[in-house]
Amino acid sequence: MIFDGVKLFDMDKFIPNNEDIYAHLKEDRNRKDDIKERLKEHSDLAYSYFLKLCEEKKLNGVFKNLENVFFGKDEYDGIKLWEEMVCNEIYMHDLGKINSGFQYRKMRNEKYENKPTEDSKHSMLSACIYFDYFFKKIRKFIGNIEENKNLCSTLLTFLFLNSYIISRHHSSFDDLYEFGEKFQESYKKYRNNKIIYEDYNVDFFATENHVKAVFKLCGDFLKNYDKSQPWNCMNIYIYTKFVYSLLVASDFYSTSEFINGNEIKKFGTIKDVDRFYDIYKENKNYKSIRRYEKCINGEGIKPYKDGDINELRSSMFLEAEKNLENHLNENIFYLEAPTGSGKTNTSINLAFKMLKNNSNLNKIFYIFPFNTLVEQTKKSLNDIFKGNKDIQNDITVVNSITPIKLIDEEEDNKLHLKGSLKQEINYERAVLDRQFLHYPIVLTTHVGFFSHLFGNEREEVFPLVHLANSVVILDEIQSYRNDIWKEIILFLKKYTEILNIKIIIMSATLPKLDKLTDTKEEFVSLIENKDKYFKNPLFKNRVKPDYSLLNVSENLWDRLKEKLIEVAKSTDKNIAIEFITKKSAEKFYDELYHNKELSGKKILLLTGDNNKFERNEIIKDVNDENNIILVSTQIIEAGLDVDMYAGFKDISILDSEEQFMGRINRSCLKKMAVVYFFDLDKASTVYKKDYRKDSSVTLKQGYIRDILENKDFDKFYEIIMRRIEENLNRENPDNIKNFRESIIELNYRIISKRMELISDDMKEYTVFINREVNLEKKGKLIGREVWQEYKKVLMDKNIGYAEKKVKLSEVMEKMSYFIYKVRSLNVSYNDLIGEIFYLEDGEKYFEDGKFKRALLEEGNCDIL
């Protein structure tokens, strides 16, 4: 272990009466007095969890990476002192609890009954004690500052940064420079008022001028460090976030063990990849691919007929695998392949292959832009591991609509009730697992993932330590805000280098983001000749674009309807039509639904307003039945597992056109399917900050049509990335230079705001609409009853935090059948909890079972 033999702060020497100083207390109904944890016990336990995390997550390599980017090879002794500073950052984080006010007011420690109580805080005092303790050590270690100026600057900078991290371990990250001012004031206060911490056996050595000088030196170091190499500032940012995550995790685990009496033994790491990989290899698709591999190597019989799409899928699978094996030391990989080519199956094999070849890797994260893709991939992985419940249980969905997974303990947690066995639910453990992502394979959305990387709130940063030494699969990255593509890829590159993360970026329309990294370094393309797949007739010619409706300038709505009816009458196969606004989709659905010419056809509407059950029912109908016309918004592009005969689409951005075409003739069973493109609503109303919405790069242009038909998306993205770079380098407050300055200054709030994937102008009202929902096998749900259940759990003061958290997550799954998002709310509401508005008379907002958002957004009543 990298930290073996590190010298810890001697609590017995510096706080002789530490046996009488407490860190936590808990009430016990079976005792008259409180159970208290001594400060030294907590410090020892937190440090033991720190070491356990380092071992479990194999963080030696991460800290070696940090040492390599911050220190020279000849600075061994300085590195050892830095390691001591990191370890004691954990061990000393709560020393401020010696504060007499904290002991009396928070710990009910009668020894301090007659002591001053106006200040009961502890985090800033902890930071001041830590600063003073190591300031003396650094001064003694450095000796002649002029001769060791660089090393001195480095160590003092980390002294200041570590003090900052300690001061924030119960709160969110803020602006480092604001902290600098507060820290100087706090240090002066504590230095001049020893009575607050009279049990600390040392007077503060550093003066206010020393603190001020270190603060200035830290700022100078950060600026000079970034000048030495482009974007070095991100190394510092990642260090602070990572060590903060380690600190709060160690603190949280140790506190949880004291309060709940349960040691945290499992962190959801993959210790034996063969447990997963061996079962995966028994899958029939995998076996067919291996038979195909033998065939192309001159052994055995080809498992597919000529022209079978599975031959192409197998070829892509094997090529990606081979290229990965040749570049295992690289960090970021592209998997660019057509829709329907088996990217999910290929990517899970690549992830297992990485874990197999790198013993430090121990988790897999699948990141998606939409919950529909999360659900679909969970189903695909369940099918792959069908029959093995243990492994299926290790694959966990983490999002706002999936209940917290409860733990199936088999130890001593079963209670006898009326002669039967009942499992005791460990709510605390379940919540802890969710907060820190203690699962071997995590499926989640990009919003959650980005909050861990860039969020400044304490709970957002909790899981960051568990992202280290992981394989991360980013699906459909082109769906992310492209006005921050450069910032995204620069950060991802740095995160992979420091935290030993391997990233697979995959999509059918994949922007080569390495071109935005300001270096000539390229990421690894796992498919070297993508034309072999994209331009194969099975993929390229399975759908033909028809632009005739783009030439219609008058009465487009009527012409569109006429054309769709014409196509629908000519076949009993299923047809999809996509609009880019819900308003148009709902209007078109209404007109088709009541059109007598389409009698015998089933007309379905799919938008973001469909709950999970409705969406799954629609997908089932489309896949099981014929004679369906599916009217949809862009949700159909989100990896929806449907296969349509023909399609119509309102043009928006080129990526969306290709994604939609991927839902047509998906199985390639028809020689040629057609997608009719039209131009109805302005894409700028939906894709506000998107560089791809400009008419000069849409299907209105002939050269863009050529790109779509020939699948030359690299040409398209060269144009887009050039525009991104041009805009980022303009003289305005949002340019890349100013953002870089925010990172240098460690302004966490600005960074977090910049890296949000959902901007303020996209945020909406959340409404709960009371009605009855028939779930068939699950029975009938009544909205009013679900709302009352939600209120009851929320207001229940007789259950603990963890149990409440779990029960709320369970009721939230039921609530998802009644919750809708609207851009404005112009009707009266009956109840309000948090930011959820409750509408009692819900049926009046539905027609023919479909939600009519216009009745809410354009109503005549004011919000009460």
Image (tube, grey):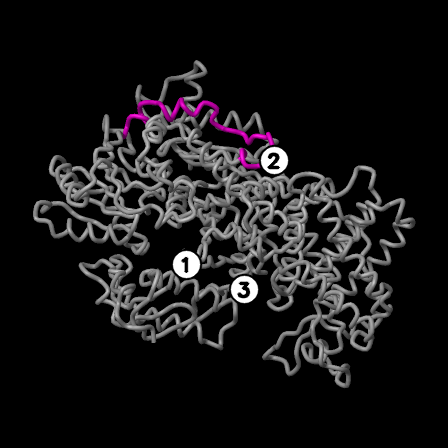
Rendered location of residue 738, percent (x, y): 60, 49
Residue 402 shows in the view:
no
Residue 188 shows in the view:
yes
Q: CA distance from mark 3 to mark 1?
A: 32 Å
Amino acid type at mark 3: Glu
- Residue that badge 1 annotates: 763
- Identify the magenta region: 514-543
Magenta residue check for 518:
yes
**N-term mark: 2 or 3:** 2
Q: Nearer the viewer, residue 11 or 195?
A: 195
Q: Nearer the viewer, residue 847 or 585?
A: 585
| 37 horizontally vs 716: left or right | right
Q: CA distance from mark 2 to mark 1?
A: 41 Å
Rendered location of residue 270, percent (x, y): 56, 44
Residue furthest bottom as drawn: 114
The image quarter in which residue 211 lies: bottom right
Q: Secondary structure at mark 3?
A: helix
Amino acid type at mark 1: Lys
**Quadrant location, the N terminus:** top right
Rendered location of residue 352, percent (x, y): 52, 36
Q: Which mark is residue 428?
A: 3
Residue at 52%, 39% in the rendered image: 725
Q: Secondary structure at mark 2?
A: loop
Other residues around mark 1 within 10 Å, as few (<14) / some (14–19) / many (≥20): few
Q: Which mark is residue 358?
A: 2
Marks 3, 1: nearer the viewer: 1
